Image: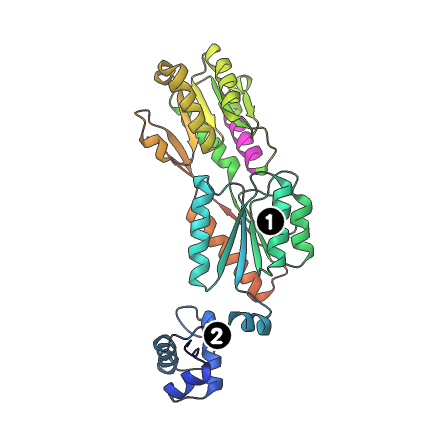
């Protein structure tokens, strides 16, 4: 015969306090900020109640609590590809930050497909998530607007989207593109080109703008050349781009993303390993794959942990306080030279 579930009344009896006091402490524990409380219950009494609850293995009725509060204590997170280390690491930090504040995270990947993103948004809305953190993809404006129109707190990360009134956590990508290019110029490169994605996403556009600006400021504007790669069939397009790059004796390459860097190095090692002796490469983000090669890759380091913690902080503040004014947080890149 199944054992009876512990109730708030059981905790009150064991702790020698009122049922209302136990309910008050249990329902407001997520409001503690680590240094003080937003309710007037002594620390000793609160700890006693929580200890009794743990000892009796109390399991709160989250469904009932959700009906009372109008919240589910869940947030939805949509990235472009959870298998990509950059997004996987951001997801890990989002989950860690949310867990500390008693929130559960539901993840989804758009795979740069606006239809898939729309389906995920609909599923998250039907689950009643309290807010969303989204990496938008191309042609997803209507789906993002649907979140805003529904009054669901929203934070866009990594990529901006014009005309959308939402909170944002973004990298200073123009600065990052300049840092990457300037590092090659300092090391004597003059024929510097860029491999980027054909997608017109804000982060990609800004990195390209930074590359152009650095080249122009160095008097190398006539050498600016950006090879654009479509998201599908990347290896074949990389191969074509490198045929052109090697034919013109390029001595420096800025890769707009980590994935492009890995595919580029694989191509060079396979077809022209000697080129690695005279072509310098700068990547975005580090990779375990770099450690497996004797070719050292300098890279722009993004503050991934801040992406996670800042987006959660802004989102939960918006959920708690119903902020009407959108918040923008711009993060600064670092350059790691090896």
- Say whether residue 61 is magenta: no
Q: CA distance from mark 1 to mark 2?
A: 31 Å
Find residue 266 and report its image quarter: top left
The residue singled out by tag 1 in the image is: 120
Closer to the camera in the image, 191 or 50: 50
Q: Residue at x 63, y 38 (%)?
A: 138
x and y, in percent, of residue 220 in the image? 51, 19
Q: Which quadrant of the rendered structure holds the C terminus?
A: top left
The one of 274 and 124 positioned closer to us in this rendering? 124
Q: Secondary structure at mark 1?
A: helix
Q: Which is more N-terminal, label 2 or label 1? A: 2
Indicate the quadrant where residue 288 lies. top left
**Which of the numbered marks, if any, corresponds to residue 28?**
2
Q: Judge whether residue 47 can be spotted in this image.
A: yes
Is residue 181 positioned above or below 1 on the image? above
Highlighted magenta segment, given as a residue range: 203-214
């Amino acid at each position: 015969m199944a054992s009876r579930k512990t109730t708030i009344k059981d905790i009150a009896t064991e702790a020698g306090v009122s049922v209302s006091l136990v309910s008050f402490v249990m329902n407001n524990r997520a409001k503690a900020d680590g240094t003080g409380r937003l309710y007037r219950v002594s620390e000793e009494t609160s700890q006693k109640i929580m200890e009794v609850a743990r000892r009796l293995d109390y399991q709160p009725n989250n469904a009932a609590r959700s009906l009372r509060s109008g919240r589910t204590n869940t947030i939805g997170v949509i990235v472009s590809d959870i298998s990509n280390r950059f997004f996987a690491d951001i997801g890990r930090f989002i989950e860690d930050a949310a867990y500390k504040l008693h929130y559960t995270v539901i993840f989804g990947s758009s795979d740069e497909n606006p239809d898939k993103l729309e389906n995920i948004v609909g599923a998250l809305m039907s689950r009643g998530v309290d807010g969303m953190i989204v990496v938008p993809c191309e042609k997803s404006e209507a789906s993002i607007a649907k979140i805003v129109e529904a009054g669901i707190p929203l934070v866009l990360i990594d990529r901006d989207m014009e005309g959308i009134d939402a909170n944002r956590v973004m990298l200073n990508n123009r600065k990052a593109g300049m840092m990457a290019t300037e590092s090659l110029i300092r090391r004597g490169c003059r024929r510097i080109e860029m491999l980027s994605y054909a997608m017109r996403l804000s982060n990609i556009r800004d990195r390209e703008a930074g590359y152009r600006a650095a080249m122009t400021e160095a008097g190398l504007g006539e050498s600016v050349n950006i090879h654009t790669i479509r998201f599908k069939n990347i290896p074949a397009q990389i191969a074509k781009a490198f045929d052109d790059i090697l034919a013109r004796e390029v001595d420096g390459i800025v890769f707009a993303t980590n994935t492009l860097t890995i595919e580029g190095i694989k191509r060079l090692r396979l077809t022209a390993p000697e080129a690695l002796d005279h072509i310098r490469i700068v990547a975005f983000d580090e990779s375990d794959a770099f450690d497996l090669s004797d070719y050292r890759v300098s890279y722009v380091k993004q503050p991934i942990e801040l992406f996670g913690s800042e987006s959660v902080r802004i989102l939960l503040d918006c959920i708690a306080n119903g902020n009407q004014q959108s918040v923008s947080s711009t993060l600064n890149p670092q350059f790691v030279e090896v």
